[in-house]
Every structure is written in structure tokens, then in C-alpha cells.
Image (cartoon, coloured by chain):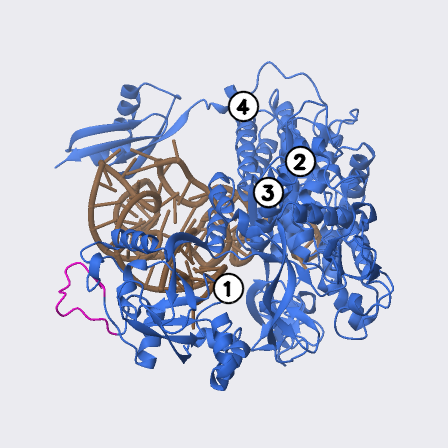
Amino acid sequence: MSDATTQAVEGPRYDFRSAEPKWQQAWDSRGCFHVDDVPTDGKPKYFVLEMFPYPSGKIHMGHVRNYTLGDVVARYKRARGHSVMHPMGWDAFGLPAENAARERGVHPAKWTYENIANMRTELKRMGLSLDWAREFATCQPEYYRHQQKLFLDFLKAGLVERKESWVNWDPIDGTVLANEQVIDGRGWRSGALVEKKQLSQWFFSITKFAPDLLSALDTLDRWPERVRLMQANWIGRSEGARLRFDLAAGNDSVEVYTTRPDTLYGMSFMAIAPEHPLADKVAASDPKAAAFIAECKSKGTSEVTIETGEKLGYDTGLRVKHPFIPGATYPVWIANFVLMEYGTGAIFGCPAHDQRDLDFARKYNLGVTPVVLPPDADPANFAVGKEAYTGPGVAYNSGFLDGLDVDAAKRAAIDALAAKGIGEGVTNWRLRDWGVSRQRYWGCPIPIVHCDACGAVAVPDAELPVRLPDDVTFDLPGNPLDRHPTWKHVNCPSCGKAARRETDTFDTFVDSSWYFARYCCASDASQPLARAAVDHWMPVDQYIGGIEHAILHLLYSRFFTRAMKETGHIAVEEPFAGLFTQGMVNHESYKSADGAWLYPEEIEKRPDGTAVHRETGQPVTVGRIEAMSKSKRNTIDPGAIIARYGADTARWFILSDNPPERDMEWTESGAAGAFRFTQRIYRLAENLPAASAPPAEFGAAGRTLRRATHKAIAAVTEAWEGFAFNVAVARLYELANAITDAERAKDEPGLGWARREAVEAMARLSSPAMPHLAEEIFALLNPASTALVADLAWPEAEPALLVADSVTIAVQVMGKLRGSIDVAPNAPADHVIAAAEAEPNVARSLEGKRIVKRIHVPNRIVNFVIAG
RNA sequence: GCGGUCGUGGCGGAAUGGUAGACGCGCAAGCUUGAGGUGCUUGUGGGGGAAACCCUGUGGAGGUUCGAGUCCUCUCGACCGCACCA
């Protein structure tokens, strides 16, 4: 920060440096934002929640935006008479803590708790209306013990399964990798070739709720449409048929799932996934097949294969019988484009009506028989070339299905399969069960003991929590829990014999799938959720966070809430009644001549928009405006902004820039402008008369200002209410402009009172955004009062003052603006039309014309339709 | 490929079918100031005009309407999500 910048904010009239801590202290000492677990105040409840932060070390501008948005809602709702719960906590388990341990030798717990302490201090400087008594971190045994209990309850209720699944295995790191962590077939950290491996893991049975998770999306009317659509796509319902194909030789059969049973007569091959059990069987006696399968598995997740979409296959030599055509058989291929995870891992190929099947058939010279005739096509010469026909039509070349349209043919085919006992209509889901096992240390231990005699045994409730051991090392790859000398060696809770603890920990998404409910009863050590408190507060009325969690976190939370309901921990099914997804905070990026990224503090902007390096004077390339990131160095430290301008300025700018759901750009000039505004409205509050009874009469300027004040009350209220926060800011600027106009007006009786009223309204209307400044101005205006704005009811507009003395009505001729007239509100139509016709410019346009129609919209517009 | 969102001044953006560009940023001129990255005043979509005013203008083309940024159809572009899902 340059000297010049520091000077610019030195000695301001409103000294945020002393005011902000003072008011934070005042709110805190009066417990303004504390609520009881089960309140008895009779107020309507409102639960405001922002997605809790990962304790990475410092807060960033995304946090500032997120928590400012939430704080506006919380403070506004409180003023509107709600009992508001607004808690904060820490999503504290996760990989970065382990990486810090590996790279810097600091214990994950120490690293995490130090980061939390630092970030808590930073958050407190923002002046958020939080109930800090409810704070917790998910890495505390006091939290995760309850999570372990929930898991065991889910297990008892049949909502948890242990099953084999295919995973990306990094043989060097000795761990499972998420798909995103596999880059070109290699582990992102180790660079080792990733293997596909079957591993026994714990799964939450989220698919049991798939129908409900989908249909209930319709009830979430305060969620963004696109989030609901993304979830619907993710859950992925599809209607089709499951049917059995018998092998031509032997007794084996293969199950297939299809959405197009109407095209069965167009079959020319069957394809099975490389992981399909039948493929294994073939490979056992066919080395070439084994080699092909191995190749597919190594390339399975490689982006190259997926992007080029090259279809590879291997003909097993086996053949299957057609379900309807006696004697017809088709080859069985192993194909890389068939997914074991979807449907049954096997498909029947109908190249004429499925693009992938067609690509495959063309490559390997398999037959292409059209069986759906497009409308207006000629059955004698309709043929499929490079594009499969997937549109509507009528079945032909299809035996008993001939002449039926697609839908009727599907039903007829399913009926026929069912009659033969070889198939049925089914609904299929894209959603997979949620694998939660991670081979990591810094996570919640899964409370299970593996016994050779008893199998997987639940840890008894009385022994919870299963605590993470502190004495672990990170000098070797793999899971430190697995190689800990003693931790995993325990006796079986069931038979007492020597057994092994589960050394996997939970996916951190589990931690965040129920934290919102835990806030309601955070101090109750005896149980995960205390029903009285949770039933009172849940669901969250307004949840706010980034769009990046549109699917996983929100879907998992919806699942968890249903599972908690089924196990008696909660009454609701949907955790978040309202959801708001904020945009990102972007900033320009800067590059020096030698190509190195530069921090905004390292450059100096020239008036012409170019930039130079502050120290060297070398030219700097001003790059794209993009998401703040450490690698591009285009970050702005909220701590520095708050130190320089104060929290209110940071909050105000972030709200004013643009609509909160869109990406915003952080600019120096914008922040400076917001700072100037804080000073300006404080100035408006100086030198006002003391409080007094309202005068009986107001002059013209006073009346104008009072109308502006009450219009602002109505407009700002509506804007805060509707998440149009940038509009609320604009309306407050208008009010400030109106106050400035009144300051300049000739003094008249009552004007001082009207200015006081306006300034106090200004302070209170802006208090959700700039709470410290609001308190400071209120105290300045009311030196004898000990009341806090944070405790005051929201201002109400006087309806009489919302009606203007006169309204300006636009006058159009043939829809074109030709003038405007001032008339009394709700003046009679004939009067308004006469005045409109008399307006000089309008009269000129009407001269010599015949008016065929006069349209009058009261208080809005007059439009003359003329002929000739 | 499938699904979706969005196109308004130099920029961020306002606008229940009813005066397009509120409000802010930036810019320009002026006043204030020892100075100013302060404060204040005025101006600021494009074209014409001395002015009054006129024409034009919300990605493009049609349509509905007395009246369209807003509703409908087509089209172009940008962005986002999912993606070999059978």
C-alpha cells in the first residue's frame, strides 16, 4: 500500500477504526445475536446459513461476499421481527491439512486449529451478526462422535452397505483417487499409472431415495431453477426395459437394459462392458480378450479416450439368441463404451437408431437394419447413413410391432417380454450409491471393527467416539492410520477375539451433510440432534453459497436429512427451504514483461489504463478479469481492505457492484467509491437539529424530502427482501442525493426535522449492509439513547407520503413520446386526456390529424392513436 | 451431443407490457484547495439542429399489441452444467 493511499483515508470524520470494534463489542456484550435452542419468545423463526468455510488459513473475498449476503438477510429478518439463528462453524477435515503435514511437518490438527483461530478473528472483524456460541469444527470429537452414531443408526436402518466397487487406485500413494485426480491415466501427485481396482468400501444407499430426491425437487420453489435441473440430470431417471438374452450355446444368459425395446428387431450385436462378469469368463480362456480388457481398464478414465470417443471392441465369438426371432443369433462383443456402472453393463446394439451403436457397427462391419420409419419416409428406400435415426416414427421390419408408433411399440415389446418371462419394464437411475470410504488420516473414523469370525461389527455406542490417534507420521505414502502400530488392533465387540479397526475415514462431504442441523443444538453432548431444537429451527430458511456445490453437497445433504428422518433424528426431509447461489469475485490479472504474475499491490495503474511495475517501472500487461486465485496472484486480501477502509466499506462495495448471483469484479475504484460514500452519509448526519416532535407544517423542500425518505423506505425494503441488493444500494444513493438537495435548499420550517428523519432512515435502511456506520449515526443523532440499531424494528413507510402531490404522465402519439404533463394523482381520465391534448408539443403532433383512439393508463401514460 | 442461463452506453447495471439507460464507476469541463487520488457543480448512447425539438437506439429477423428491453417464433453469439447413461 502506498503512502498516498494511506493518506487518503487518514483522519476521516467517521473513524471506522475505532467505531467498528466498539459496535462489535456492544453487540457482543448485549448478546444481540444469541438465540435459544428452543426459544420461548413467540417470534417466527428464521434460520439463515451460509456454507461454512474450509479453514485454509485466511478468509478470501468469496467468503466476504458469502457472509455479507447472509448477514444482510439475517439482520434484515431480525429487524422484521424474526427470531434469527445465524451460526458459523468450520468444515475442518480434509486433504490440505494432510498435505501441510507432508510438506511442512506440522500436525494436521495444529495446522487446522491455528487456521481456525486466525480466520475467526478475521470473520469477527467483518461485524457479522453471528451466534458464536454455536460454533464448532467438524474435526472435533465432540462433533464427529455424533456423526459416527448417525452412521451406525443408518447402518441398522439398512441405509449403509459394504460392497465392492471399481476405484482408481494409485499404487505409489497407496490410495484411492477421485476421477478428477486422475490426469491422463496417472495419479495427480505421484504420476503413477492408475489402476482400476475392486475395493470393498462403505456406501450410503442414496439410490434408495432416488425417486423421492427427484420428485421433491418440485417442492423446492425457493431454489434456483438451474440447481434443480442440475440435480434432476444428476439423478437421471430413465424409463426402459430390462431383458434377458440367452447364449446360443450353454445355459448362460446376459441381462440388458434398454430405453428402446421397440427397436429390438433392429439388433445386430450385443456389447458388454470390459468389467462384465461374462468378459472375465471369456478372458480366462482367451488371452487376446484378456489383453483387450486390460487395455480398456487402463484407459478407462483417460480424458483422451473419452474426448475422441473412439470405440473399441473385441468379438468374443459367443452368440446370443434374439428374444422374438426364432433361430436368429448375434455376436457378443466386449466394448469400451459400455459402462459397467450403468444399467446392467450390457447392451443390445441397434445401429440404425443409436449413434454409438452405429459408429461401432460401421467400424466393425456389423449390420444396420432400420426398424423405425420416419414420417413421410418411404419404407422401400429409407436407409441410415452416418447418422442414426432417433426421432419419432412407425415400427417396420419388426414382426408383431409393425405399424405401431414408438411409444406403442415400446409398450407392446415390454408386454411381450413379460409374457415370455424374460423381461419387464423398469425405471433406471443414473445416480450411484455414495461411496464414503477414504484411505486418509484427517477425517472422521468409520466406527467399525473387522473381525475374521463376525465380519464387520459396529462399534458399540458407549465406545464412541472412535478418536483419531494423534501420534501419526506422514513420512510414508498411504494411510497413516493403517500403519499406526497400535490403533487398529482391537478386540471384536461381538466375540472378543482379536480384530482390526476400520482404518478408512469418511469422505468429508459426510461432515457437511448434517452440520446445519447440528447448529440447532450444538451444546447438547448427549445426542446428534435434540429433537425439540431441531424441530423448531429446521429447515434452514435461507442457505447461501457457491454454485460449485449445486450437486454434490446439496444432494448429499438432502439424502442425509431423509436418512436422519428415517432414523428418528429429525422431522423434515428437505434441509434447505431457500437456496441462493452467489457469483464469484473476480479481479484483473497482471503479468510482468518476463511473464511472471504480479499481485495488484505490485503494480501501478496509469490514467490511460495501462500499468507499470511499482518498483521497476517496467510495463505490465493487464490481463483478463478472472476468478481470484493464488496462482494468478490476482487476489485481494480482505484483511488489508478492512484495515484500510473498514468492514462496512468492503461489505457495501461487494453489495453495490452487481446482482449477487452474478460474478462480480473487485476494483480499487469501486472500493474507494464505497469508502467515500460512508464518509458522505456520516457528513449528512452532522449538524442536524436535536430530536423533537414533528412540526405541524412542512415547506416544499421538506415535503419533497419526506416523500423521498418514505419512498426509499418502501423501495429499499422491497430490494433487501428480494435479494436485489445492488438495487437497495442504488435506492440509498438516491436518498443520499435527496438529503444533499435538501441541505442546499433555503431553510424553512420543519426542514431540519425532515433532514433528521431522512438521515435516520438512511442509517437504519443501510444497517443490514453497513451495521457499524448505522450504529454510529444513530448514536450521533440520539446521544441520550442506549438503543442499538441492531435491536430496532425495521422502519415503516407512511402510506400517505408515498402518494405524490402530482404525477408526471408521459404523452405519446402513436406510441412515440411527444411530451409529459403533471396532473393530480388519480385525476379523472377526461381531465388527463384534455391536458395531454393541450400540451404544446403534443398538440403540434396532433395538428390536422384525426384521433381515432385515446388510451389512458392512470398515473402512467396517455397514448393517442391517429388516422391519416 | 443433451440440458440450461444470458445478450441494454466506455464499464457494472436499473426498468409490475407504459417516459430505456435509475444508481454507481469511469471520463470531460468548471469551482474549492498550498496541493490533491478530497469536497462540490454541470455534462456524458448515437446522429442532426443555434435552440425548441427531430430521427435513431436494448445481438439480428419477423410477429402479437394503442404501446415491446420485457410476450411469441426463428436466428446469431457468449457462458455454465452433464456427457460413450444404452
Badge 1 or badge 3: first in the primary sequence: 1
* The C terminus of chain A, quarter of image: top left
Quarter containing the N terminus of chain A: bottom right
Residue A562 is labelled as 3
Earlier residue among tags 4 and 1: 1
Residues indicated by labels 4 and 1 sit on the same polypeptide chain = yes
- Badge number at residue A341: 1
Q: Which amino acid, by three-letter code, is at mark 4?
A: Arg
Task: Residue at 62%, 40% (x, y): give it.
Answer: A566
Colour given to chain B in the rendered image: brown
Question: Which element type, helix, strand or loop, lies under badge 2?
Answer: helix
- Which residue position is annotated with label 2? A75
Q: Residues within 10 Å of mark 2 (few under 14, many from 20)?
A: many
| Kind of element beneath mark 1 | loop
Dot 1 alpha-carbon crowd within 10 angstroms: few under 14, some 14 to 19, many 20 or more: some
- What is the CA distance from the residue labelled 3 to the residue labelled 2? 30 Å
| Callout 4: SS | helix
Q: CA distance from mark 4 to mark 2?
A: 30 Å
First in sequence: mark 1 or mark 2? 2
Q: Chain of mark 4?
A: A
Query: In front: A341, or A4?
Result: A341
Question: Who's blue, chain-wise?
Answer: A
